């Protein structure tokens, strides 16, 4: 039996992660080379005040996508429906084309340890996570994207590669993938696999967004710190991802050592300058 076609998510262009230190600059200058913003959902799950004031003001000028860090979709805890109710209310406010969170677990017994912990790559885990993703996506009434996390350890019980694992969940949950290019590079370095093999296995129709970020190289391992510019090998991997997946919305993350907005814009321009000739050639 032929599988139904997967609907392509819209191409939003080239975006940035919205950070509090940039609120005033964004509203004062309305930079034209920023096509959209990604917000950290948890920053806006509040009753009111400055976060929502700036959110609404900036949303008047730019599309936004919601990205979460606390869903703990891989946990054995029950889904947190109070959190999901708040998330849905925020989505009704922001009207994102999709929302996303990480393919990981972040706590147990109701305790959030605020870290993105990897999962064992097994059939049992695929079934567990896919079922939870289906519930969340149905409740939110919007497409959900799951993001590959960077990792620093593996499980003895893992029976497949990370790329087989994330592709399996996306297929069974009928959801999409937020492909973090930097995380692929970081994990490939830490676990000694080929990042291009990873890219080439992921189903093209399932990828709805890219992330780009910097990291900290500690010599024997790399930490996904989001506090440096994107390095050349990650840009090269990104170019290959554009060739494989075509027009996919891309954004740049910076979560620490955040520079003024005008120092981040050249990185966004570089992402655009890499992608546009490739996309033009693909469309010819």
Image: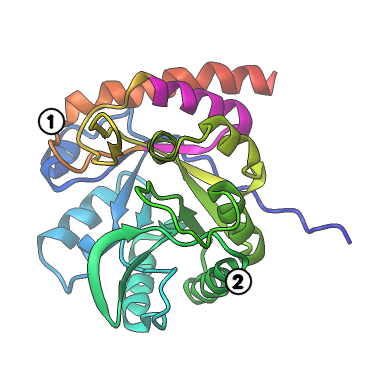
Q: Quadrant of the C terminus?
A: top right
Of marks 2 and 1, the one in the foreground: 2
Q: For this view, does 1 lie left or right of residue 207?
A: right
- Residue furthest front in the image: 156
Which residue does the image show at 23% across and 35% down from the upper left? 30
Which residue does the image show at 63% across and 35% down from the upper left? 200
Front-lying residue, 34 or 110: 110
Q: Residues within 10 Å of mark 1 (few under 14, many from 20)?
A: few
Which residue does the image show at 51% across and 35% down from the upper left? 193
Q: Which residue is mark 1?
A: 260
Q: Quadrant of the N terminus?
A: bottom right
> Residue 24: where, in percent of width, then height?
11, 41
Q: Which residues are magenta?
A: 233-251
> Residue 220: where, in percent of width, then height?
29, 32
Q: For this view, does 74 lie left or right of residue 138?
A: left
Q: CA distance from mark 2 to mark 1?
A: 44 Å
Q: Secondary structure at mark 2?
A: helix
Q: Secondary structure at mark 1?
A: loop
214 lies above or below 40: above
Q: For this view, does 23 lie left or right of residue 176?
A: left
- The reply to whether discs 2 and 1 touch (Cβ–Cβ < 8 Å) is no
Q: Which residue is mark 2?
A: 127
164 lies above or below 32: below
SS majority, magenta: helix
**Can residue 250 be found in the magenta stretch?**
yes
Q: Residues within 10 Å of mark 2 (few under 14, many from 20)?
A: some
């Amino acid at each position: 039996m032929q599988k139904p076609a997967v609907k392509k998510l819209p191409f939003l262009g080239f975006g940035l992660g919205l950070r509090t230190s940039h609120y005033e600059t964004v509203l004062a200058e309305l930079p034209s080379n920023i096509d959209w913003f990604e917000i950290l959902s948890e920053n806006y799950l509040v009753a009111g005040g400055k976060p929502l004031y700036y959110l609404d003001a900036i949303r008047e000028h730019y599309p936004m996508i919601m990205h979460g860090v606390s869903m703990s979709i891989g946990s054995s805890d029950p889904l947190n429906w109070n959190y999901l109710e708040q998330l849905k209310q925020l989505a009704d406010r922001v009207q994102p084309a999709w929302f996303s969170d990480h393919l990981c677990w972040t706590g147990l017994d109701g305790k959030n340890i605020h870290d993105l912990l990897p999962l064992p790559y097994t059939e049992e885990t695929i079934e567990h996570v896919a079922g939870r993703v289906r519930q969340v996506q149905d409740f939110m009434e919007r497409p959900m994207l799951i993001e590959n996390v960077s990792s620093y350890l593996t499980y003895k019980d893992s029976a497949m590669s990370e790329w087989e694992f994330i592709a399996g969940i996306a297929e069974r949950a009928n959801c999409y993938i937020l492909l973090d290019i930097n995380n692929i590079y970081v994990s490939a370095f830490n676990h000694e696999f080929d990042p291009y093999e990873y890219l080439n296995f992921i189903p093209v129709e399932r990828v709805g967004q890219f992330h780009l970020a910097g990291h900290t190289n500690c010599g024997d391992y790399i930490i996904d710190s989001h506090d440096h510019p994107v390095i050349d090998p990650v840009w090269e991997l990104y170019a290959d991802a554009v060739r494989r997946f075509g027009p996919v919305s891309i954004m740049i993350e910076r979560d620490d050592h955040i520079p003024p907005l005008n120092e981040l814009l050249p990185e966004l321009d570089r992402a655009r300058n890499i992608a546009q000739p490739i996309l033009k050639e693909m469309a010819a």
